[in-house]
Image (cartoon, grey):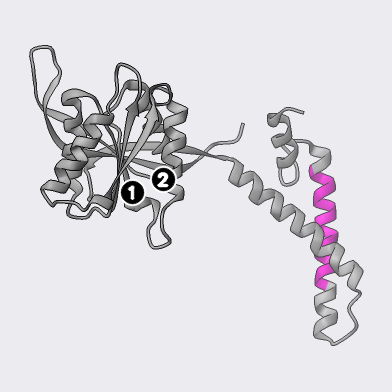
């Protein structure tokens, strides 16, 4: 049976538009149930003995119909996603992607922006092969330690093999482990993922990890670009706010 057919059958419990036979049988049973329930309540008020079985049946039929109505009304809603941009709110945990060469500047900009509130930074980099951002991640960690902006234990470098760094699912899975490590006094809203750095597949994995409701993501747009269109100076992080809402859908 198709989902549309199932919904029509379910609506038949309270509407003749579905299956008239089911509707009238249900209406008949509900009427009997209401009368039985009314009689049992009257017996109770008169302090007479209540027939337990008939009361249970009567209330059960009414309960089933009410439950069906509530289920149908809940199903008749669809989730609508709205997004808007705003200046990023400071986070206690930051997850950033380390790029090679000058691209590491976006991770640095994100850390400097959030550092007054930061308790922990997770810097995801690639290792092995000809292209690796591990050295840039290590240098950035050392730079902040030397400047005494952050303590050594505040920056955690997460190393992924090049094949993993280019696999959205592997990146997403690694970020999920970070969320699982959240202490009891922090929530997912205390974490923000900067999806600017890394490669396109890396960014995709970070974006997917930040999509569930209650999580936060940000991006850094360049303040200045060169003649090829590449950013030469990063701006402040911009938070991508994803708002999930339920919208009523008219039954068909």
- Numbered circle sitting on residue 71: none
Magenta includes 149?
A: no
Residues at circles 1 and 2 in contact by the CB criterion of under 8 Å: yes
Q: Position of residue 182 (x, y in %)?
A: 41, 53
On the rendered structure, is 250 left or right of 201?
right
- Numbered circle sitting on residue 178: 2
Question: Which is more toward the observer, 240 or 126?
Answer: 126
Disc 1 to disc 2, C-alpha distance: 10 Å
For residue 51, above or below residue 76: below
For residue 103, above or below residue 215: above
Range drawn in magenta: 23-38
In the rendered image, is residue 4 in sight? Answer: yes
The total number of labels drawn is 2
For residue 98, above or below residue 184: above
On the rendered structure, is 78 left or right of 64?
left
Work out whether mark 1 precedes mark 2 in sequence or the reverse, and give the earlier one: 2
- Residue lying at 59% horizontally and 46% vertically, measured from the top left: 74
Question: Which is more toward the observer, 229 or 252?
Answer: 229
Q: Position of residue 234 (x, y in %)?
A: 13, 31
Q: Position of residue 93 (x, y in %)?
A: 30, 50
Furthest residue to the top?
228
Judged from the image, the secondary structure of the residue bearing numbered disc 2 is helix
On the rendered structure, is 146 left or right of 56?
left
């Amino acid at each position: 049976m198709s989902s549309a057919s199932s919904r029509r059958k379910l609506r038949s419990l309270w509407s003749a538009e579905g299956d008239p036979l089911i509707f009238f049988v249900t209406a008949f049973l509900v009427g009997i149930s209401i009368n039985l329930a009314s009689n049992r309540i009257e017996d109770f008020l008169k302090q007479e003995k209540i027939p337990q079985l008939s009361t249970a049946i009567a209330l059960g039929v009414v309960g089933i119909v009410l439950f069906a109505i509530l289920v149908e009304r809940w199903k008749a809603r669809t989730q609508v996603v709205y997004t808007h941009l705003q200046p990023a709110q400071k986070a206690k945990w930051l997850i950033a992607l380390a790029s090679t060469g000058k691209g590491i500047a976006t991770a640095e900009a994100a850390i400097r922006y959030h550092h007054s509130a930061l308790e922990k930074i997770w810097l995801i980099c690639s290792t092995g092969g000809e292209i690796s951002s591990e050295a840039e991640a290590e240098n950035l960690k050392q730079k902040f330690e030397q400047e005494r902006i952050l303590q050594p234990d505040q920056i955690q470098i997460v190393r992924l093999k090049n094949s993993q760094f280019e696999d959205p699912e592997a990146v997403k899975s690694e970020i999920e482990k970070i969320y699982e490590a959240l202490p009891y006094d922090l929530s997912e809203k205390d974490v923000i993922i900067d999806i600017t750095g890394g490669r396109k597949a890396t960014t995709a994995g970070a974006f997917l990890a930040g999509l569930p409701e209650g999580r936060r993501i940000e991006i850094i747009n360049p303040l200045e670009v060169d003649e090829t269109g590449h950013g030469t100076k990063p701006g402040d992080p911009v938070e991508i706010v994803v708002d999930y809402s339920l919208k009523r859908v008219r039954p068909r």
